[in-house]
Image: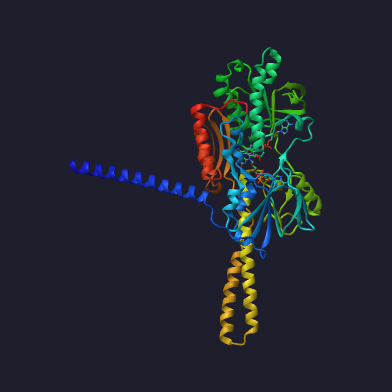
Amino acid sequence: SSSTAKQGLRVLRFLWRFTWLSALGGAAYLSYHIYDSKHPPEQLPLDPTKKTLVILGSGWGSVSLLKKLDTDDYNVIVISPRNFFLFTPLLPSCTTGTIEHRSIMEPLRHIIRHKKRAVKYYEAEATKVDVDRRVVKINDFSDVKGTVSETEVPFDYLVVGVGAENATFGIPGVKENACFLKEIGDAQQIRKRVMDCIETATFKDQSEEEKDRLLHMVVVGGGPTGIEFAAELQDFFEEDLRKWVPDIADRFKVTLVEALPNVLPMFSKALIDYTEKTFKDENISVRTKTMVKKVTDKNIEVESTQADGSKVKESINYGLLVWATGNAVRGVVRDLMGQIPAQKNSRRGLAVNDYLVVDGTDGIWALGDCSATKYAPTAQVASQQGNFLARLFNSMAKTQAVEEELRVLDARLQATADEAEKAQLTAEINAKGRSLSKVKQLSPFQYSHQGSLAYIGADRAVADLNWFGGAVSSATGGELTYLFWRSAYVSMVFSLRNRILVLTDWLKTKAFGRDVSRE
Ligand code: FAD
Ligand code: NAI
């Protein structure tokens, strides 16, 4: 028994050392990353002999490309009105303050300052891509302008990653009266408006009818944006608002309006049913087969299809209206498509080939939501396309370098009469030729779908996942899936800094609740 005790002691000692070593390793890893993020190394200057690669946008597609691109090989210029990357999957959480908006933003300046060669950034919108002259016209629409706020940027290669704008389908009143949920500013506006509606509803002598209107939060669109936002809003009400503003407890109401017969069309039937049931339990009213036709400042006019196929028109009052009905093509992209005959039949965005080259162009690529492919417009697709383009540009640069070396070797071979040198040069040319065919062998873009995840409120999420390259798939919903949702997103946010901020926000919300101040 004394030998068993000794063995037990040895195991304990081992575990103790292992824990210490892991903690030390973890601390060293963290310290290194924090130091590295704060101390970017010296960068190579721009090199006029290199080709100019202009990247439009600072979203999922463009930033994934930038992250993996070897900037040693190009003079890179990034143009975007947004000088940060936004981790959109957690944007719905910013509308209620579950997560603070800066926690999911990564400054573009941090990203480009860590590249090997200097990268230029212009905070501007591309207003026109002139295909013939190979220039991009850019405009600084920000509040502060210098004497120059409009100019042109020439390019050798161009990557268009400007995303999409909000679809309104020309429905009258949407642009003027609804809030959207695409950018940080949208989330801030919603957060402010929710509190404004609540404070106005509790204003002295407010009529009952007006209180009901102001406390009716309507979400249009049952895609993942609408679902996640409605879920976050109801959580806010149940966990915080109900407690701090008891006057509204019996009136605050969230309604989700969807034109199709069900919400979340990209999820499996079981998860759609689970989501609709969870929403019912959470007291979120779901109005499917209901299409919004007109919007005014206080109500929406809808047409719903009844079980017998008949249509019923109705007017619904609201205090807050959030419009989440998907994507539309941006003006600059529409203009670009108009210049290229091969884009004549494309409707959803820039038609591209298997290498993401814009059909009908030479040296122009498109990725993400502004391109029209067989894939859904998601961050998953855009980031995989960005990684693919980085591989493509890195391999193109290597190819060009090897081709240049081959030209020099060939010239020397032609010039020499020495047989020994001839043999050596021929061997070198053969070896380089073999390596050239290797770097040239880049297979076309192939999307690997990892699955779909969505938060549905009350600490539950739904997940349709693909494992082992799609060989195994699973559909799950509930609290465990929510833990998976959280860990997946926290591991995916851009940087260690974002990771720590998001985790701290979650902890803060758990400990103190969400902030109900209006600003
Ligand atoms: P974006 O990320 O939208 O980036 C476009 C960039 O172009 C921006 O930097 C913009 O400022 C810039 N830009 C705009 N106009 C111009 C111009 N004229 N000139 C230059 N630059 C311009 N997808 C998922 O896979 N999983 C999710 O969980 C998920 N959650 C989402 C949640 C929300 C609330 C939203 C709105 C979307 C979500 N998506 C999700 C979809 C995903 O965000 C998009 O598919 C993705 O952002 C597309 O990437 P992108 O690079 O094409 O465009
Ligand atoms: P969406 O296109 O997925 O859904 C929009 C919904 O609005 C559709 O179901 C449509 O039927 C409905 N609609 C359109 N017009 C309407 C009207 N007039 N009245 C009522 N309903 C109307 O749009 P969403 O949710 O903005 O997503 C855009 C893209 O971003 C999608 O590809 C989506 O997959 C992706 N995304 C993914 C997320 C995730 O994976 N968790 C989260 C958010 C977005």
**Numbered marks: total:** 0
Residue 23: % across, % down: 38, 44
Residue 112: % across, % down: 60, 52
Image quadrant holding the N terminus, namely top left
Q: Relative to the observer, which residue lies in front, 330 or 434?
A: 330
Where residue 246 sits, quadrant-wise, is: top right
Q: Relative to the observer, which residue lies in front, 336 or 275?
A: 336
Position above or below: 29 against 436: above
* Left or right placement of residue 322 versus residue 469 in this view: right
Tell me which residue sits at (50%, 51%) in the image.
36
| Residue 277 in sight | no
* Left or right placement of residue 502 versus residue 83 in this view: left
The type of colouring in the image is rainbow
Residue 144: % across, % down: 71, 42
Position above or below: 507 against 347: above
Where residue 397 sits, quadrant-wise, is: bottom right
Image quadrant holding the C terminus, namely top right
Tell me which residue sits at (66%, 36%) in the image.
185
Tell me which residue sits at (31%, 43%) in the image.
16
* Left or right placement of residue 408 versus residue 348 in this view: left
Check the image and name the residue furthest to the front. 147
| Residue 213 in sight | yes
Q: Where on the image, by quarter, is ligand 2?
A: top right
Residue 153: % across, % down: 73, 55
Q: Relative to the observer, which residue lies in front, 167 or 372?
A: 167
